Image: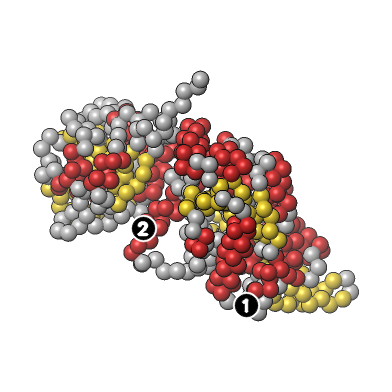
Amino acid sequence: MTHTSDPHARRILILDFGSQYTQLIARGIRELNVYCEILPFDADISRIKSFKPAGVVLSGGPATVTEADTPRADREVFDLGCPILGICYGMQTMAAQLGGKVETSKQREYGSAEIRSTSTSPLIDGLHDRLEADGTALLQVWMSHGDRVSTLPDGFRVLAVSENAPMAAIANLDRNFFGVQFHPEVTHTTQGRAMMERFVRDICDCTGDWTPANIIDDLLSRIREEVGSDGVVLGLSGGVDSSVVAVLLHQAIGEQLTCIFVDNGLLRQGEVEEVMETFKDDFGIRIVQVDASERFLEALSGITDPECKRKVIGGIFVDVFQEEADKIENISWLAQGTIYPDVIESAGAGTGKAKVIKSHHNVGGIPDTLELQLLEPLRELFKDEVRAVGLALGLPQSIIYRHPFPGPGLGVRILGEVRQEYADILRQADAIFLEELRRSDLYDSTSQAFAVFLPVRSVGVVGDNRSYEFVISLRAVETVDFMTADWKRLPYDLLARVSTRIINEVRSVSRVTYDISSKPPATIEWE
Ligand code: XMP
């Protein structure tokens, strides 16, 4: 029998003090094949204890320890008996809470800095970017702070200094408590990843069992345990997350899973066939395919406002889904492709500060009248982990690495009123663009690319005749997180080929433009 380790056995807890980098800390630790979770800094101590962390990271944050009523860790966090790494604000609050002092320094330190190692420690020993003549290690780090530790708590010593932070790294080696004033989680700290590895692997003794094979074993047994012999229904869109959930559930519970795939008439060319072939034919998954395109297009008739269109599409999706689910017997669970960033986002969304720019991700929201229990097997995974799991489950690269496609589909890429005729034109133009992008080997290095239909007419000449036809705009962007994006500098030759082909091959289009707006102020989609 092969032995597989429990990937949750030794894990790290990150207490979030509000840093913009907290997710980066978590992703960095996961990339070291160690499981970790983020909890708010004021999470109940019983919750922290029951997580049984092998180590705790206190994140940075925007507040200042020098004022009362700013965030502090629960005092019992320091009595858990496990190693602690405080980063920036996390280091300052640790120092202050353990009896040291923090002051607002005259000189703020923001950006690249160099630290000099001054004493040995398992966190930094042997790491350097440069060495001085006497062998002293110098490391390039990223600083972003106004406060600094001025008096060390008992038992602590200085590990490294920088020009503006005489206590750039500190430690109590007896208790395995470490504090760094800089940010090891950002790439500008060149040895940052190595330091994080030292902390989680050497100091916290996490073995690195968080691998796709172990994750899958763990998920399969947890799904089987949770679901038992119940039936599960899943809305399959063909996007990465729902595709991975489908294959994972199929492997875990086989025939107990039914997928519902709704064709809303606003899918891309060949999408229906691709989804049915991959999941039904190749994987043998039970899928109910519903052609609801007429119903969607009828409901959208006369509606021009983007948010109204989103609501109408989302509403019908829920109705269709519910009608189909009601026809299946013994269903107790609704599976969803929720992933860890969604969980973090909704936990942090309670402040109500974020403004709604577009009502994203509401499409296909939970039809609560179904009264089903929610099954979210990917809720602990980051996107790159979902992809790794999907590949290990045998899903094709074309699905795992496909560009994101919005829930309302072509509905938000046809400006104004959605009509069948417009959708057909857009589908063809979009397919030509993506085909040429792939042919030029630029699909994978582009974050998202698509065509947009503009319902305005423009004059052209075709042969000896004047034409007066629609306009297609091409959009291609590069982005890491889809929150900000830059337009992709595609080669002119490629754009020329796409334009010629669209005008020649797609009836009713006389002009093609390329969108060169970045986000912000524009958004990626046009609506
Ligand atoms: P924007 O246009 O806001 O898009 O810059 C950012 C990302 O979100 C996708 N998007 C959506 N996804 N439902 C979705 O599921 C929506 O209503 C929606 N609107 C935009 C968009 O394709 C891009 O990847």
- Identified at 28% across, 46% down, the residue is 47
Mark 2 to mark 1 CA distance (whole Å): 33 Å
Task: Check disc 2 and report the residue beneath it.
Answer: 348
Question: In the rendered image, is residue 49 in sight?
Answer: yes
Q: Secondary structure at mark 1?
A: loop
Q: Mark 2 belongs to which amino acid?
A: Gly
The quarter of the picture where the C terminus appears is bottom right
Q: Residue lying furthest right in this view?
A: 464
Q: Which mark is residue 351?
A: none
Q: Which residue is mark 1?
A: 303
Q: Which numbered disc flags the more N-terminal residue, 2 or 1?
A: 1
Identify the residue at image location x=18%, y=43%.
76
Q: Residue 494, percent across and down?
A: 71, 55
Q: 229 or 482, which lies in front?
A: 229
Image height of 173 relative to 77, above or below: above
Q: Position of residue 16 (x, y in %)?
A: 30, 50
Which residue type carries mark 1?
Ile
For label 2, count other residues whose C-alpha is less than 10 Å away and answer few (under 14), some (14-19) or many (20+): some
Q: Residue 448: percent from the left, percent from the top? A: 59, 55
Some atom of ligand 1 lies within 8 Å of the CB belonging to the residue at label 1: no
Q: Nearer the viewer, residue 463 or 408?
A: 408
Label 1 neighbourhood size at 10 Å, few (<14), some (14-19), many (20+)? some
Horizontally, residue 391 falls left or right of residue 425, namely left
> Does 157 sit above or below residue 24?
above
Rendered residue at 29%/30% (across/down)? 203
Specify the farthest residue to the bottom.
Answer: 302
Asked if one can make out residue 493 in the rendered structure from this viewpoint, the answer is no
Left/right placement of residue 264 relative to residue 106 reads right
> In front here: 119 or 155?
155
Is disc 2 placed on a helix, strand or loop? helix
